[in-house]
Amino acid sequence: MKKLKFLSFLLSLLVITSTSCKKDNPDDNTGGGNDNPPSTKKCYITKITEDDGSYSQLTYNSNHKIIKVTDFNSNGTPENSYISFSYNNDGTLNVVLIHDDNNNQGKYVFHYKQSKPDSAYFYDKTGTGWKKEGTFAITMDGNKLSQIIIFAENNGQNYPMQKFSYTYTGDNLTKKETYSMDTTNQQYNLDETMLYENDTKNNPQHGIGVDFLFLDDNFISLNNYTKITYKDKNGNVNKGLSYNITYEYNSNDYPTKKTAKTFDGSETDVALFTYDCP
């Protein structure tokens, strides 16, 4: 399962564009409704610790929007790579900078229309400055992310590469479809489908300023995923990439421990969450 480290998922996008305290109740594991709204007391996740001892540290501004994520190894030493986030005056996300060895290596600049994100531009750091490598065309349905199309840029021309389509039940993502462009017929072909089931507890990665931030589905839903089913382009379930997920929660209904186990039992991932609850 993909690790929770924030830098990893942003670097994966760089590759796409530049190369072209209780257990959860089983009754909670239903499709994605929100019959029991989460606690109104807001907690802010400050640390995510992986089962190998490495962790990500989260820093916020005075409005409790995330401004920096730093990854550390199991010895507590910074990995010399981190992500910083800046915001517009109205609180919308403006620029995401990827720092590698304390140098800015990549950035995403967001554009808005009527206060809704409609695009983001990816730039790569070169010897002469920033070079635009790609565009993310963002479609919103109300406040929900509906579609993303990734365009790679070459010699001033944009070429569609991938498309992501999102389906919801209530405030939770329940399906994401990934398509790739077939350049021979200029049509999108389905690559994979992810199906999600959710609990009714607070998702700590939702509502911290980056809810629509590309491809990392952990930010999107109001509640936590309890089951992720991976289907290939033919609709076949891959049990090695599909997960059942259980949680332990604190008194504010935020998860303190997440255990994800593949359908076939080949892999188990554990993550611990630390919070500030002002």
Image: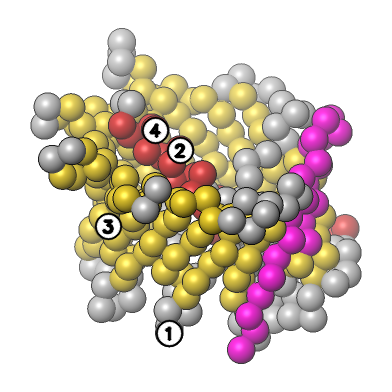
Q: Are marks 2 and 1 in contact (CB under 8 Å)?
A: no
* Tag 1 residue: 62
Give the Cα distance between marks 3 and 2.
18 Å
Q: Are marks 2 and 4 in contact (CB under 8 Å)?
A: yes
* Tag 3 residue: 110
- Relative to residue 227, is residue 211 drawn left or right? left
Q: Secondary structure at mark 2?
A: helix
Q: x%, y% of residue 264?
A: 84, 30
Q: Are marks 3 and 4 in contact (CB under 8 Å)?
A: no
Residue 15's disc number: 4
Tell me which residue sits at (68%, 39%) in the image: 1
Tell me which residue sits at (48%, 79%) in the image: 64
Most extreme residue toward the bottom is: 278
Please report whichever mark, 3 or 4, sits nearer to the chain's N-terminal start. 4
- The part of the chain drawn in magenta is 257-278
Mark 3 or mark 4, whichever is nearer to me: 4
Looking at the rendered structure, the kind of residue marked 2 is Ser
User: What is the quadrant of the C terminus in the image?
Assistant: bottom right
Taking depth in this image into account, of 7 and 27 the one nearest to the observer is: 7
